[in-house]
Amino acid sequence: MKIFFYTLRPYDELDYCEQLRRKTGIDYAWTVDAPNPGNLCLAQGCDAVSTNPCAMTPEYLEAFAQMGVKYLPCRSIGYDHIPLDAAKRLGLRVSHSHYPPEGVANYTIMLMLMATRKMNQIMLRAAAQDYSLQGKMGRDLSNCTVGVIGAGKIGRTVLRHLAGFGCRLLAYDLYPQPEAGFPAEYVSLDTLYAESDVITLHLNATPDNCHLIDAAAIAKMKDGVILVNTARGTLIEPDALVAGLESGKVGGAAVDVVEDEAGICYYNRCGEPLPNRELALLRSYPNVIVSPHTAFYTDVNVASMVQSVFEAVAHFANGEPEPNEVKL
């Protein structure tokens, strides 16, 4: 068995690949580059192709299938970069990675605290030696109502950890799972919009929830609401967020993801014009915190993401159930 890794980061993922090769006997090859027409041939002779989020087209999948590739284990929780209809048609099995939810959950809470305390403005002004107080007064998260959209593993961990802050907690999920000791009240989406001071998103990207947060949704929210997104950029409609910030309806935002971030996040673009107007605008606002899709980035999570690829390939090849397989 052999895996070809595209977009492999040699400074962190490679050591884990080598450890797992010795442990499992599954071989691998790799490139730092994303798939493109000129390097698809590198996967020749491999059983699986693994990527981080990057541009993947049906034509790429057809080329891989013709080479004998059978599996597409992603090194990310999200798999919206994979054209699933093409994968199904070609008989390619797709899986997503797994990692403990605490890393993203705690990063999310960090962003909430930074946004409610206006930390971006405090740091920007301190860098210019402005140590005055005017305009820096924030809000205590303990006195806020926090709404969590998506109560899966990460969303539930956010709620569990926030319980210690004393917040009022609301949750919305298509498939609510009430349980003893659950720290939040399940409510409708409209109720969550209307009553939350802070709203945080924890959903996989699907066609149905694309631009879930649009102008109509923002209009239902409290004045001055703070929006946090460590999930997927497509959940928020860019123009609606910008309009909400500029009107003051949205009091602040903290985003680890933006729409159309492929080719920007995980690359050094120092000194270059950003080919993403939303990102350029958001970076210019003092009440917006932007981080480059790093909520997942801990030692534990990177190890788990690479391990999940080797596990999935072994399960697929041995006819064993793969718990993270995407149902096509």
Image: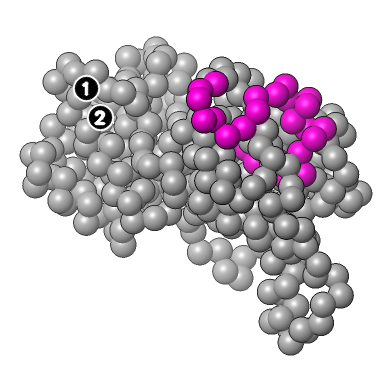
Q: Which residue is mark 1?
A: 316
Q: Is residue 57 magenta?
A: no
Q: Quadrant of the N terminus?
A: top left
Residue neighbourhood size for the residue with mark 1, other residues' Cα within 10 Å, grouped as few (<14), some (14–19), many (≥20): some
Q: Position of residue 85 (x, y in %)?
A: 47, 16
Q: Which residue is mark 2?
A: 312
In the visual, does 291 lie left or right of 285? left
- Residue type at the position of mark 1: Phe
Q: Is residue 308 visible from the viewing direction of this image? A: yes
Dot 1 falls on a residue whose secondary structure is: helix
Residue neighbourhood size for the residue with mark 2, other residues' Cα within 10 Å, grouped as few (<14), some (14–19), many (≥20): many
**Mark number, residue 271:** none
Q: Are marks 2 and 1 in contact (CB under 8 Å)?
A: yes
Q: Position of residue 127 (x, y in %)?
A: 69, 82
Q: Which is nearer the eye, 143 or 192? A: 143
Q: Which is nearer the eye, 138 or 6? A: 138
- The range drawn in magenta is 178-201
Q: Position of residue 50 (x, y in %)?
A: 32, 37
In the visual, does 80 lie left or right of 207? left
Q: Quadrant of the C terminus?
A: top left
Q: Is residue 182 magenta?
A: yes
Residue 100 vs 285, above or below: the answer is above
Residue 319: image quadrant is: top left
Q: Which is nearer the eye, 38 or 256? A: 256
Q: Residue at x 39, y 55 (%)?
A: 298
Q: Position of residue 262 (x, y in %)?
A: 54, 46
